């Protein structure tokens, strides 16, 4: 390499001209463990904690199911609960059409539609 090219090279890339530095003092294993620990807490607060909260809310919703609640199943069927048992419910879908479902098959509870509100 010519001296002129070496000068241009070192002026454009100053890190290439510096000699390699020694590793910083400290235990690299501790740095790795600290990184893993920090990543775990980030994942906990971004993923695990919100998922547990949603799961707890779902369990509370399923436990609070009552006769007369308007529900939507995980398959998209809408109906009104007519009977609540220990692990299953009976949902009235239409006149003379009732389905027996497992409680976990309920996706959400909806407010009653316009003309069917209680107290009207």
Image (cartoon, rainbow, N blue to C red):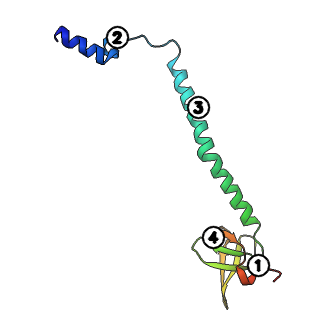
Residue drawn where x is 24% and y is 15% of the image: 8
Residue under label 1, please give it. 68
Q: Nearer the viewer, mark 1 or mark 4?
A: 1
First in sequence: mark 1 vs mark 4:
1
For residue 54, side relative to residue 24 (left or right):
right
**Residue on which the image places disc 4:** 105
Label located before the other in sequence (2 or 3)? 2
Residue 63 % position (x, y): 75, 65
Q: Quadrant of residue 68?
A: bottom right
Is residue 39 shown above or below 19? below
Local crowd size for mark 1, using a 10 Å CA cut-off: few (<14), some (14–19), many (≥20): some
Please report contact status of discs 2 and 4: CB closer than 8 Å, yes or no: no
Query: In the orientation shown, which residue stands out farthest toward the bottom?
Result: 96
- Whether residue 29 sits left or right of residue 72 in the image: it is left
Separation of residues labelled 2 and 4 (CA atoms): 66 Å
Gap in Å between the C-alphas at discs 1 and 3?
A: 49 Å
Q: Where does residue 67 sit, x and y in percent of width and height?
A: 77, 77
Q: Earlier in the sequence, mark 2 or mark 4?
A: 2
Which corner quadrant holds the N terminus?
top left
Q: Residue at x 71, y 81 (%)?
A: 114
Between circles 1 and 2, the one closer to the viewer is 2
- Measure the alpha-carbon separation of dots 1 and 2: 78 Å
Q: At numbered mark 2, what does the secondary structure look like: helix, strand or loop?
A: loop
Return the residue nearer the eye: 101 or 93.
93
Choose the circle earlier in sequence order: 3 or 4. 3
Q: Secondary structure at mark 3?
A: helix
Percent x, y for residue 40?
A: 58, 37
Precedes in sequence: disc 1 or disc 2: 2
Q: Is residue 115 above or below residue 74?
A: below
What label does residue 37 carry, if any?
A: 3
Q: Nearer the viewer, residue 74 or 42?
A: 42
Q: Which mark is residue 18?
A: 2
């Amino acid at each position: 390499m010519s001296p002129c090219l070496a000068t241009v090279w070192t002026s454009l890339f100053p890190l290439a001209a510096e000699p390699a530095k020694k590793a910083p003092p400290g235990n690299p294993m501790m740095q790795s463990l600290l990184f893993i620990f920090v990543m775990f807490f980030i994942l906990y607060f971004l993923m695990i904690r919100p998922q547990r909260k949603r799961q707890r809310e779902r369990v509370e919703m399923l436990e609070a199911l009552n006769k007369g609640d308007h529900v939507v199943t995980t398959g998209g069927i809408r109906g009104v609960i007519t009977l609540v048992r220990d692990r299953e419910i009976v949902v009235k879908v239409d006149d003379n059409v009732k389905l027996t479902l497992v409680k976990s098959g309920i996706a959400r509870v909806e407010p009653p539609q316009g003309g069917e509100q209680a107290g009207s």
